[in-house]
């Protein structure tokens, strides 16, 4: 992802774990423990805090504690960053990301930790719950607020998020999206001819939409937009201007070259076959 033109090379998700004494930190009296021994967490952490998510490759866990406490394993994050630098020494920490659609009180604590590792770190939120029927991605930077010498706070200011991708990444995402229409969620790779056909169909649909927009603007159905007009003008100017005669000459020249290559290939194949027959006599 690209946030305001700055490529985020690395966004680390720090495992958030509840303190081992979270039961003792509750302000209200804790209920009497059951007679049976309490169930132990599979990771050895507090059993009262069920895990929300598990990311197996890095064993990164995010926990929800009933007493609204949060703890950051700084040593783990530091070790993971040192290991990452051995593979990609030029990459640095620009911020951190979290799944969710809003900023929570825990975000302030974690953001404070990353403020020690990076200057003005970026906080990225990914809405995996699809609150607005889409996976919204938002970016924030923090700014101090409050009265000097007294109570201070942190205010998160939203940033403009721009999606930047390579063509190869777009091809992979388009292929994955096609599984939505497959009953078994499995789809094979398309051939080169099918990809050319799909690209041609998309271009044709786009040109049809652009022509319809231009006709609606000329007829007065749609208000003219100067930004769209300049964009279309720049797009038209990028198309090379070739006269029909020159285009026909170029096409015929390419066809002649192709016929010559085909003729030479067939001639070479005939010579090889004749040579094999002569050697077999």
Image (spheres, rainbow, N blue to C red):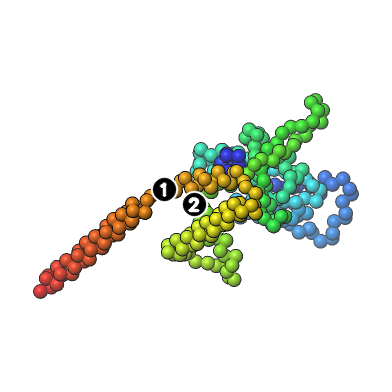
User: How many numbered marks are there?
Assistant: 2
Asked which secondary structure carries label 1, the reply is loop
List the single residue furthest toward the right: 29
In this rendering, the answer to whether 220 lies above or below 119 is below
In the rendered structure, are the residues bearing label 2 and label 1 in contact, judged by CB atoms less than 8 Å apart?
no
Asked which secondary structure carries label 2, the reply is helix
Measure how far apart labels 2 and 1 are at the Cα level. 23 Å
Q: Which residue is drawn at 68% across and 52% down?
A: 127
| Residue 140 left/right relative to 86 | right
Is residue 77 in view from this perspective?
A: no
| Residue 24 left/right relative to 258 | right
Q: How crowded is mark 2: few (under 14 residues within 10 Å), some or many (20 or more)?
A: few
**Which labelled disc corresponds to residue 272?**
none
In this rendering, the answer to whether 102 lies above or below 33 is above
Is residue 263 in view from this perspective?
A: yes
Q: Which of marks 2 and 1 is in front?
A: 1
> What percent of the width, then of the height, locates residue 75?
64, 41
**Which labelled disc corresponds to residue 240?**
1
Q: Residue at x 48, y 48 (%)?
A: 236
The residue where tag 2 is placed is 167
- Lower position in the chain sequence, tag 2 or tag 1: 2
List the single residue furthest toward the front: 219
> What percent of the width, then of the height, locates residue 179?
57, 65
Q: State the image quarter where residue 47 is shown.
A: bottom right
């Amino acid at each position: 992802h690209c946030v305001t033109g700055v490529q985020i090379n690395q966004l680390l998700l720090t495992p958030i774990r509840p303190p081992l004494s979270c039961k003792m930190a509750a302000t209200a009296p804790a209920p009497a423990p059951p007679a049976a021994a309490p169930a132990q967490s599979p990771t050895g952490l507090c059993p009262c805090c069920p895990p929300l998510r598990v990311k197996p490759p890095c064993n990164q866990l995010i926990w929800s504690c009933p007493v609204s406490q949060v703890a950051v394993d700084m040593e783990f994050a530091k070790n993971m960053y040192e290991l990452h630098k051995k593979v990609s020494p030029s990459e640095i920490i620009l911020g951190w990301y979290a799944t969710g659609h809003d900023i929570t009180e825990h975000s302030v604590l974690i953001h404070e930790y990353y403020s020690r590792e990076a200057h003005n770190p970026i906080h990225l939120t990914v809405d995996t719950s699809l609150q607005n029927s889409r996976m919204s991605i938002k970016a924030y930077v923090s700014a101090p607020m409050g009265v000097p010498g007294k109570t201070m706070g942190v205010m998160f200011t939203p940033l403009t998020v721009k999606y930047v991708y390579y063509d190869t990444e777009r091809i992979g995402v388009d292929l994955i999206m096609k599984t939505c229409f497959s009953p078994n969620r499995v789809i094979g790779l398309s051939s080169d001819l099918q990809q050319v056909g799909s690209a041609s169909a998309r271009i044709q649909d786009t040109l049809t939409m652009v022509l319809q927009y231009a006709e609606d603007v000329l007829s007065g159905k749609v208000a003219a937009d100067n930004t769209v007009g300049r964009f279309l003008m720049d797009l038209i100017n990028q198309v090379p201007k070739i006269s029909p005669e020159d285009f026909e000459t170029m096409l015929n020249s390419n066809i002649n070259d192709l016929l010559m290559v085909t003729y030479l290939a067939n001639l070479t194949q005939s010579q090889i076959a004749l040579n094999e027959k002569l050697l077999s006599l």
